[in-house]
Image (cartoon, grey):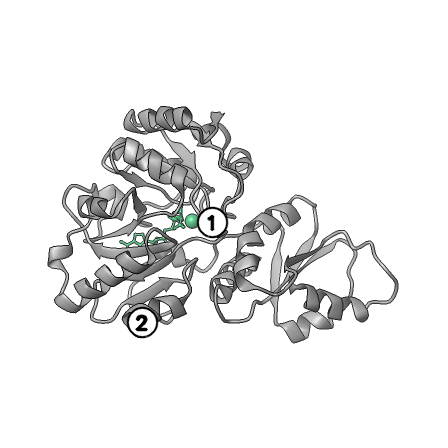
Amino acid sequence: MRILSVSDSDITLAAEALKAGLLVAFPTETVYGLGADGFNPAALARVFEVKNRPRFDPLIIHIARLEGLELAADLDSLEGEARKKTGLLCGGLWPGPLTLILPKRGAVPDLATAGLATVAVRLPDHPAARKLIARSTGAVAAPSANPFGRLSPTRAEHVRDQLGDRVDLILDGGRTRVGVESTVLDMTGPVPRLLRPGGVPREKIEALIGPVDIPGPSAGPVNAPGQLKSHYAPRTPLTLHRPEEMAVLEYEAGAGCLFFSGESRDRWLRGIPGAGPFPGIRVLSGGGDTTEAAASLFDTLHELDRLGLFRIRAEEAPPVGLGPAINDRLRRAAARS
Ligand code: TXA
Ligand code: MG
């Protein structure tokens, strides 16, 4: 495995590697992706192997520009209203952390979509990612660059540490800006369905296209298999707490506490006799902002995971903005424990 920069010449090199069927991890605005040429079945098969990901869990095809959408998706087979809404979302929120589920084109190998008649497409808001995609075949399949079920990578080092030589190249673009994966929205039914809360808040989507459905846990077949209950998990067992519970937790040496805001941490500290240091204490956003908290979520979990704590106790975020995406990841991390 080689780590490259995001200089122009390194991106060209990485694009050539993709075209040759190699796997290239690259930064997006959300998390690092494990990229493979979206039209190359052998490379796609390797993605599943390297991540140890079940073949029934389909991948997202990343495109470099709006015109690239037609490479993977067949918009003509969308019903009129859905087509109109898709246009509004692409125009208003792309490039950005929004993945759309659309009817699939035949050119996309079944392996990428796990045999589904739909395909997930996203136009990332990251210059290096878009250059890389544009210089390869224009369609790059990329799941998050972590072993299946583990914490998503927000830095090149996370990819290196978790995947090592199983990946051919890593483009190092520093820490990712948004920090949680894209919102996944299924456009193929009568009402758009939010399959995964992510980097674009529901409010922003609804402001553009009106109400979206949030399928309950038992609503029909698993259509975003990434929604498996246990996912995004650190090695350290994690428990999730409401703010009221968190405020009155006793201090346990060797346990970590992940607070949503500086205010919650201070409230907790006031109830603890004696002064620190408390090594495993972290705050996601000093000022209690959900966007800032999302940006540091996986980064902080990776960091806490390295401290050898016996437990991480995490506080729920308020359910606004990126709060639902944060809580979704924390709940899945807790499900493993
Ligand atoms: O932000 C992101 O989306 C990152 C970066 C690298 O772009 N990628 C990412 O990919 O999170 P992954 O593979 O970890 O998650 C993709 C999600 C999974 O939950 C998968 O089940 C769902 O998208 N998905 C993919 N294709 C689908 C389809 N045709 N129908 C329903 N869900 C689909
Ligand atoms: Mg993932």
Q: Which residue is depicted at the point 36% across and 37% down?
A: 35
Count neighbours of disc 1 (C-alpha within 10 A) and say few if under 14, some if 14 to 19, many if 20 or more: many
Residue corresponding to mark 2 = 212
On screen, residue 182 versus residue 240, left or right, reads: left
* Relative side of 285 to 89, left or right: right
| Total number of numbered discs in the rendering | 2
Q: Nearer the viewer, residue 292 or 224?
A: 292
The x, y position of residue 152, in whole percent, is 49, 47
Does the image show residue 211? yes
Could you say which is closer to the camera, residue 192 or residue 314? Answer: 192
In the displayed structure, 29 sits above or below 47; it is below
Question: In the rendered image, which quarter is residue 8 located in?
Answer: top left
Q: Nearer the viewer, mark 2 or mark 1?
A: 2
Residue at 74%, 71% in the rendered image:
267
Residue 235 visible within the image = no
| Residue appearing at x 38%, y 67% in the figure | 204
Q: Quadrant of residue 41?
A: top left
Q: Quadrant of residue 39?
A: top left
Q: Give how far across and how far down residue 316 sits, in percent.
A: 58, 67
Position of residue 95 relative to residue 17, above or below, is below
**Residue pushed farthest right?**
274
Viewer-side residue, 63 vs 58: 63
**Residue corresponding to mark 1:** 149
Q: State the residue at coordinates (25%, 62%).
A: 88
Residue 70: horizontal and vertical position, in percent? 17, 47
* Nearer-the-camera pick, 171 or 273: 171
Label 1 element class: loop
Upstream in sequence: badge 2 or badge 1: 1
Query: What is the three-letter code of the residue carrying label 2?
Result: Val
Identify whether 195 is placed above or below 280.
Answer: below
Classify mark 2: helix, strand or loop: loop
Q: Position of residue 53 (x, y in %)?
A: 39, 44
